[in-house]
Image (spheres, rainbow, N blue to C red):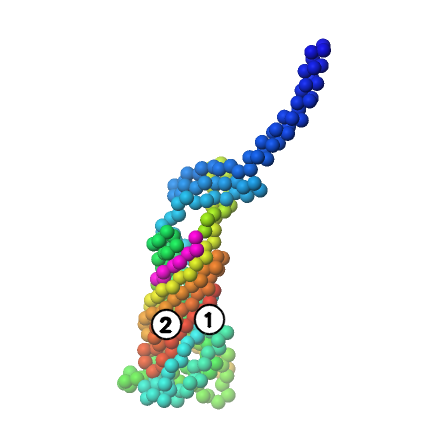
Amino acid sequence: MKTIRVIVLGTILMAPVCLWAQHKQKVDTTEITVKVISRNNKDSVIISDNGQPWVKASRVKNVTTSWFGIDLGFVNFVDNTIYTDAATQAFAPGATDSWLDLRSGKSVNVNIWILSQKINLVKHVVNLKYSLGLELNNYRFKNPVRFNPKPGTDAAIPAVVYMDEEPGRTYRKNKLAADYLTLPVMLNFTIPTKNRKIVEINRKNVRVKASKEFGVSAGISAGYLYSARNKYINSDEGKHKFKDDFSLNPWKISYVGEVNLGYLGVYGSFATKSMFKRGLDLTPYIIGVRLGL
C-alpha cells in the first residue's frame, strides 16, 4: 500500500514537468519544411512561427503566359500640320490649327489584350515580352468636323475633312474611331521577388499565388488598321456613322513602354509618324492604366 502511494505521489509530482516539456517542444518547433514535388516546380513550403504558409520557388518558368488584359487610357495627338500648305487645304478645305481640337477628357483609348508572353533572357531579370491584342482609339472633337467617306477620285488629293457650317445645327457627339490589331514587342526588366504566398493547402495539392512583380518595359509596336469610322449626333440629323479608311495610314508603328507596379501598371505609346497618309500631320500618343498583364 505504501508503494502504491509513492507511485501516485511521484506521478503527480512529475506531471507538471512532462506538461512543461511538451509545451516547450511545441514552442520550439516554430518552422517546418515540407517538400512539394509537382509537375512544373520543386518548391519548399515553409510554415512560419505565426502559422503563415509561404513557398519559396526553387525553379521559375522560362516562358510565362498571361491571358486577357485590358488598358484604359486617354489618346491625343501632336499637330505638326502646316495649314497654309496647298496639300493640307486640298485635303481639308479652309482648315485652321483649331479645327481638330480634341475633348481631352473624352478622347479615350481601350486596349484588349488576348495574350501576353514573357521569355527569360538573363536570370529572370531581363526578359523579352510581347503581346497580341486590339487597340481601340476614339478621338472626340470640339468642333463639327466631318470626314467624307467617298471623296472624289478625280482629284490628286481629294477633300476628306470639312467643317459643318449649317446654321443652327448643334452637335452632341462627334468622333473619329480608329481600331488596330496590335503586336507590341518590349524588353522587360523585372525586380526579382523572393517568396510566393500559398493560398490553399490540402492533402492532394498546394495552390501557389506568385508575388506581384515590379519592373519596366520598353520597345516598339506594330498595328494594322482594321476598322475606322466617323460617328456624330447632331440636333436635326440625329445619329450617323460612316465607315471608311479616311486616308488613314494602314500601319501604325509606335514606341511603347510600361511601368509595372504590382497590381496595376502605367503604359504609354507615341507613334513614329502621322496617322494620316496625306494632308494632315497628326502624330498620336496614349497614356493610361494597365490591368491584368
Q: Earlier in the sequence, mark 2 or mark 1?
A: 1
In the picture, the quarter occupied by the N terminus is top right
Q: Residue at x 69, y 22 (%)?
A: 13
Disc 1 target residue: 74
| Residue type of the residue flagged with mark 2 | Ala
Q: CA distance from mark 2 to mark 1?
A: 14 Å
Residue 228 coordinates in the image, percent (x, y): 38, 73
Residue 180 coordinates in the image, percent (x, y): 37, 68
Disc 2 target residue: 271
Image vertical order of residue 257 relative to residue 198, above or below: below
Image vertical order of residue 198 relative to residue 180, above or below: above
Image vertical order of residue 240 relative to residue 51, above or below: below
Q: Say which of 77 and 137 sits in front.
A: 77
Q: Say which of 222 and 62 sits in front.
A: 62
Q: Residue at x 44, y 65 (%)?
A: 267
Q: Main secondary structure of the magenta part?
A: strand
Query: Magenta residues?
Result: 185-192
